[in-house]
Image (spheres, helix red, strand yellow):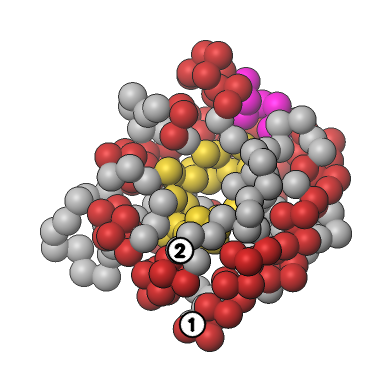
């Protein structure tokens, strides 16, 4: 819940900084629904993709205040974040709900970025890997095309706190997520991007992105300023 029309200048600066795109690297900004169409128009023809921050599982209907996958596409989105820990906590979205949302997104041609992560209590109890891999399995829609999926690991205890998991902990979790995906999708799992989403910033991005199964970042606060976002992009 950040951003108004004044933020378009930062988005345009990001678009300029990622154009032309680096080979094999994609840059995406997921904006509030109020900015989607304006952001998409502002960056048209650039190397920057625009996405939404959630969508409803239903295609349309009596769901006042919600937004459908088709609406996101109509506004210019190519991707959508689903199952972010804040959505799970603030709106009670379960993994079953996230799977339904992802199915709706895929049906409209969107790329879902499916978020999973553990709380501090779950990590302290030694259950982090089990919690996160179970969450991943339950959040994937049946029959999903692995070529159109993105997974984001966001340790809940690190979001917005400035706390960052150690490189060793990130490596362990991303390795476990890759193994889980391999169990579900076989060899195709090797090509599913797994993003790290726990307070990545210009100072720690290079070290985190060097981890074997960290294929990118789900950036929070550092995405609000073009200079910070572009510094992370430069580390990729």
Question: Is 30 drawn above or below residue 149 in the view shown?
Answer: below
User: On the rendered structure, is 163 left or right of 218?
Assistant: right
Q: Which mark is residue 159?
A: none
The residue under label 1 is: 4
Which residue reaches farthest bottom?
Answer: 6
Question: Is 106 drawn above or below residue 69 in the view shown?
Answer: above
- Give percent across and percent down for residue 186: 52, 13
- Labels 2 & 1 near each other (Cβ < 8 A): no
At 62% from the left and 29% from the top, the residue drawn is 177
At 48% from the left and 82% from the top, the residue drawn is 4
Q: Distance between the residues labelled 2 and 1?
A: 19 Å
The residue segment tinted magenta is 173-179
Task: Mark 1: give few (<14), some (14-19) or many (20+) Cα within 10 Å.
Answer: few
Q: Is residue 180 visible?
A: no
- Give percent across and percent down for residue 76: 36, 60
- Give percent across and percent down for residue 59: 20, 51
Asked if residue 11 lies in the magenta stretch, the reply is no
- Give percent across and percent down for residue 212: 77, 30
Figure quadrant of residue 211:
top right
Q: The residue tagged with tag 1: helix, strand or loop?
A: loop
Majority secondary structure of the magenta segment?
helix
The residue under label 2 is: 44
User: On the rendered structure, is 192 left or right of 119?
Assistant: left
Q: Is residue 99 visible?
A: yes
Task: Mark 2: give few (<14), some (14-19) or many (20+) Cα within 10 Å.
Answer: some
Which badge, 2 or 1, is on the more N-terminal residue?
1
Nearest the viewer among 233 and 215 is: 233
């Amino acid at each position: 819940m950040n951003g108004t029309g004044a933020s378009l200048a930062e988005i345009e600066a990001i678009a300029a900084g990622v154009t032309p795109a680096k080979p094999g690297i994609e840059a995406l900004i997921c904006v509030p629904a109020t900015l989607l169409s304006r952001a998409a128009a502002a960056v048209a023809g650039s190397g920057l993709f625009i996405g939404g921050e959630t969508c409803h599982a239903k295609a349309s209907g009596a769901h006042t205040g919600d937004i459908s996958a088709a609406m996101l596409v109509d506004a210019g989105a190519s991707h959508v974040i689903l199952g972010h820990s804040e959505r799970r906590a603030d709106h009670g979205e379960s993994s079953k709900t996230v799977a339904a949302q992802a199915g709706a997104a895929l049906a409209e041609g969107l790329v879902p970025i499916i978020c999973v992560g553990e709380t501090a209590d779950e990590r302290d109890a030694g259950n982090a890997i089990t919690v996160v891999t179970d969450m991943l399995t339950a959040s994937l829609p049946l029959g999903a095309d692995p070529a159109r999926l993105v997974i984001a690991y966001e340790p809940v205890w690190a979001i917005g706190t400035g706390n960052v998991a150690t490189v060793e902990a990130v490596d362990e979790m991303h390795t476990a997520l890759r193994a889980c995906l391999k169990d579900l999708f076989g060899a195709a799992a090797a090509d599913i991007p797994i993003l790290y989403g726990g307070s990545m910033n210009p100072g720690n991005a290079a070290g985190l992105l060097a981890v074997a199964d960290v294929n990118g970042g789900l950036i929070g606060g550092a995405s609000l300023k073009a200079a910070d976002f572009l510094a992370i992009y430069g580390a990729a």
